[in-house]
């Protein structure tokens, strides 16, 4: 809007309240009950999962050895990163965020995308996730190489290689993967197909519960190797999801999260907040302490 643009012209320094306005707009946009995926499941927050996935893929390219990748420069705006196989379908989320960027031109793309990840988790009934602004827009030259995000067809060694490179340990890996309570696989994006849980727009620990409670069998189809629940054949697990029940160390944490939703919420929040700050130099952060953004419900009560 004109008011928002004027703020830029006058050397406007945004406050937490300004970021809360962006958060609120994100919450509105992801709740747009358009026809996205409506043939599959009709409910609120249809864009929540894909926006969360954008925040994750924008951050998960970080390499701690070289300090490259991560959320700082929002490089997925550029080719070839926008065309990397792992990012198939994320144009949907980037286009949604572009609408908001037009309204709040002072926010950096990296801050916008990570704030959207926070809003998605919180609005879909997940834990509060501490967040603070400070990312800056970078250039094509900052685009990280392909292959930094996990490949769902691989095993425990690959998962560790990828997440240890970002600086995460086994507990954090298992906590982060609980995000698969949300959303679904799209055959035209990743090749995989189907949702992980019966409530794909509610943040729960159902991902872990289902991993242990259901009997998982290989799906017989022409697509990539994935598992389906024997009982209803309506849910799916990726090979990398199933590994969380097979690897001894991963299994310990997955079981703990299946048994204790509060523990999962606490650990997910910490690991996700860390993920969203990967690659951002500390001195760039405006605030020394992170903020807790309010949900729409918080503000209405
Ligand atoms: Zn995902 N993820 N992910 N993930 N992910 C998909 C979808 C979603 C892996 C993976 O290959 C895939 C994390 C970890 C890992 C979300 C969040 C997070 C899809 C389906 C695949 C194939 C994409 C499609 O077809 O649309 C692998 C191998 C992972 C680790 C080993 C972490 C960590 C996440 C967040 C913290 C979300 C929310 C989705 C659902 C997207 C949607 O559009 O519904």
Image (tube, grey):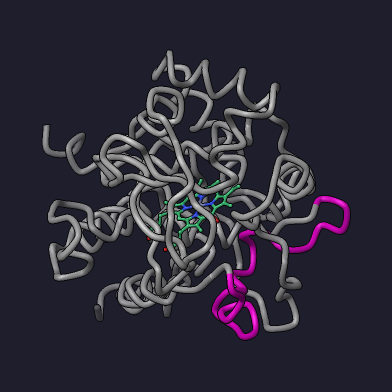
Q: Could you tell me residue 264's position as x and y percent?
A: 46, 24
Q: Residue at x 34, y 55 (%)?
A: 194
Say whether residue 2 is visible: yes
12 lies above or below 173: below
**Relative side of 189 to 139, left or right:** left
Question: What secondary structure do most residues of the magenta stretch adopt?
Answer: loop
Q: Residue at x 72, y 32 (%)?
A: 169
Q: What is the quadrant of the N terminus in the image? A: bottom left
The residue sitting at the right extreme is 65
**Relative side of 234 to 211, left or right:** left
Q: Could you tell me residue 122's position as x and y percent?
A: 33, 40
Q: Nearer the viewer, residue 172 or 96?
A: 172
Quarter of the view holding residue 216: top left
Q: Could you tell me residue 97's position as x and y percent?
A: 37, 70
Q: Residue at x 62, y 85 (%)?
A: 79
Q: Residue at x 14, y 69 (%)?
A: 34
The answer to if 83 sits in the magenta stretch is yes
173 lies above or below 32: above
Q: Could you tell me residue 136's position as x and y percent?
A: 61, 67
Q: Nearer the viewer, residue 184 or 301?
A: 184
């Amino acid at each position: 809007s004109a008011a928002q643009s004027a703020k830029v012209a006058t050397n406007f320094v945004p406050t937490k309240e300004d970021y809360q306005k962006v958060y609120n707009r994100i919450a509105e946009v992801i709740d747009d009950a358009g026809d996205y995926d409506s043939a599959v499941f009709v409910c609120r927050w249809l864009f929540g999962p894909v926006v969360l996935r954008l925040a994750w893929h924008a951050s998960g390219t970080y390499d701690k050895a070289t300090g490259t990748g991560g959320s700082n420069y929002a490089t997925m705006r550029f080719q070839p990163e926008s065309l990397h196989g792992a990012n198939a379908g994320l144009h949907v989320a980037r286009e949604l965020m572009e609408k908001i960027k037009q309204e709040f031109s002072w926010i950096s793309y990296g801050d916008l995308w990570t704030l959207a990840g926070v809003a998605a988790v919180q609005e879909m009934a997940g834990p509060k996730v501490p967040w603070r602004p400070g990312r800056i827009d970078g250039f094509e030259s900052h685009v990280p190489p392909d292959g930094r995000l996990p490949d769902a067809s691989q095993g425990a060694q690959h998962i560790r290689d990828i997440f240890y490179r970002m600086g995460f340990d086994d507990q954090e890996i298992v906590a982060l993967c609980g995000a698969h309570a949300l959303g679904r696989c799209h055959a035209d994006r990743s090749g995989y197909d189907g949702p992980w849980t019966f409530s794909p727009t509610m943040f729960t620990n159902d991902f872990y519960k289902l991993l242990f409670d259901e009997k998982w069998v290989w799906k017989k189809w022409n697509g990539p190797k994935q598992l389906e629940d024997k009982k209803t054949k309506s849910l799916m697990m990726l090979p990398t999801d199933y590994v969380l029940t097979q690897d001894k160390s991963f299994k310990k944490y997955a079981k703990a999260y299946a048994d204790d939703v509060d523990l999962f919420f606490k650990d997910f929040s910490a690991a996700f907040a860390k993920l969203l700050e990967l690659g951002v130099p500390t001195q760039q952060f405006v605030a020394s302490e992170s903020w807790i953004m309010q949900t729409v419900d918080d503000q209405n009560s």
